[in-house]
Structures are given as C-alpha cells and as structure tokens.
Image (tube, rainbow, N blue to C red):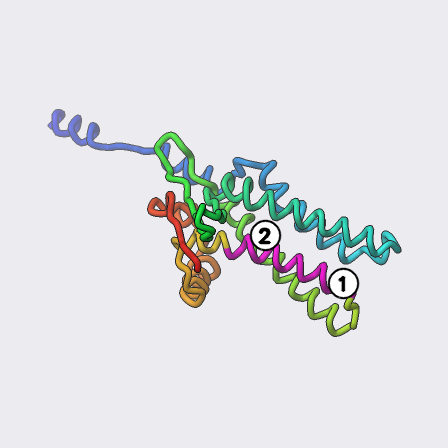
Amino acid sequence: MKQALVDDTEDVSLDFGNEEELAFRKAKIRHPVATFFHLFFRVSAIVTYVGCDWFSKSFVGCFVTVLLLLSFDFWSVKNVTGRLMVGLRWWNQIDEDGKSHWIFEARKVSPDMVAATEAEARVFWLGLIICPMIWIVFFFSSLFSLKLKWLALVIAGISLQAANLYGYVLCKMGGESDVSKITARFLSQTVFQTACPSDFQKPGLEGLEIHKH
C-alpha cells in the first residue's frame, strides 16, 4: 500500500514553468524601446499634421517635418520593430538581371529564445493597421475641403505606411501574393481571433522569395 502511494506521488509532475512563461508572454513587453518607437514616429506624424495650422504658419516647414517623421517610421518599422516585436522581416532586392525579388522571413523560435509576447504583437499590429486608416481619412478630408496642397503629403503617408502593412501581412500569411486570399486570412486570424505570438512565427518562411514580374 505504501509502495503504491510512493509510485503515485512520483508520477505527479507540476510544471510551473509553462504557466510562468504563458503569463510572461501575455503581460510583459520585452522590447520597450522598440515598442515606443514603433508608435512614436507614426503618431508624431499624425499629431504634427493635425496641428500644423496651430503650431506654425510655414507650410514648407510642416510638410518637411511630417515627411521626415513618416520616413523615419517607415525605416524603423521595416528594419527594426517588426524583427524585434513579432519576428518578421521583409525587403525587396534587384538581381543582376534587373528582376525584382520580394523576400519574406520569419524568425524560427528555438528553446533558448523566448517568443514575442502577446502585448507586443497587439501593439505592433494595431499600430500597423490603424495609422494608415487615419491617413486615408485625412485624404478624403483634404479632398473634400479642397486643401489640395496637402494631398501630396497625405498620399506619401498612405503609401509609406501601407507598404509596411502590405509587406508584413505577406510575411504573416506565408508570402502569398493573392490579395483576396491575404485579406480573407488576415481578417480571420487577426481581427476575429485573439493575437497569439505563435501565429507570427512561420517556420516555413525563412528565405522565402516571391518573384513579381
């Protein structure tokens, strides 16, 4: 009887490590600096654009300031924050024959590497989706209010931020080039489901190339 009790006790395994790791992934932000700058440049560009008439009467100064903020945002999101916050990266290169190649990568999670946290993933994707929508609203407001001098800046904002959104959606969807399939899968996985860090790790994407002619 005692021996059976000992055997039952030995079979019990309490894995507190998984629970702690799950709580860590849900609540913590591992890259606070990257998370801050992921939102800083794009939010600053929007605030500067909205407050240009209040802060300064110089159209050229406001135009250049917003354009610089948008450029800094494009570079930082494309090269830094996406890699750190969700383990994704994309870029375009031209080969010796002049052909354009789109390359999409996803970081492979190893036992020694902690996956991106849910908090970081939510911040990344919400910032990536909401800000281009705001610039689209600015486009129609400038068009209907006949502030045509701002249209070039608004179009630049839409183009730069939509390019990052499109590139990272392709990374997340596995490099598919069909826009309708991308949209359907992205909405089903990102909007209607709770963001999970494992969704942003695509082991089959390492070195994936998409050729566009």
Residue 68 highlighted magenta (yes or no): no
Q: Residue at x 78, y 72 (%)?
A: 145
Residue 131 sits above or below residue 33 on the image: below
Magenta residues, dominant SS class: helix
* Pointer 1 or 2: first along the chain: 2
In the displayed structure, does residue 135 sit left or right of residue 10? right
Residue closest to the eye, 113 or 156: 156
Q: Residue at x 57, y 53 (%)?
A: 128
- Three-letter residue code for mark 1: Trp
| Image spot of residue 2 (x, y percent) | 13, 25
| Image spot of residue 13 (x, y percent) | 26, 32
Q: Are marks 1 and 2 in contact (CB under 8 Å)?
A: no
Q: Which residue is mark 1?
A: 150
Callout 1 secondary element: helix
Callout 2 secondary element: helix
Quadrant of the rendered image containing residue 194: bottom left
Q: CA distance from mark 1 to mark 2?
A: 23 Å
Residue closest to the eye, 92 or 43: 92
* Residue range highlighted in magenta: 149-166
| Image spot of residue 52 (x, y percent) | 81, 55
| Eye-nearest disc, 1 or 2 | 1
Residue closest to the eye, 94 or 192: 94
User: Pointer 2: residues within 10 angstroms few (<14), some, or many (20+)?
Assistant: some
In the displayed structure, does residue 134 sit left or right of residue 2? right
User: Pointer 1: residues within 10 angstroms few (<14), some, or many (20+)?
Assistant: some
Quadrant of the rendered image containing residue 176: bottom left
- Three-letter residue code for mark 2: Gly
Q: Which residue is mark 2?
A: 127
Q: Residue at x 71, y 55 (%)?
A: 46
| Image spot of residue 44 (x, y percent) | 71, 49
Residue 151 highlighted magenta (yes or no): yes
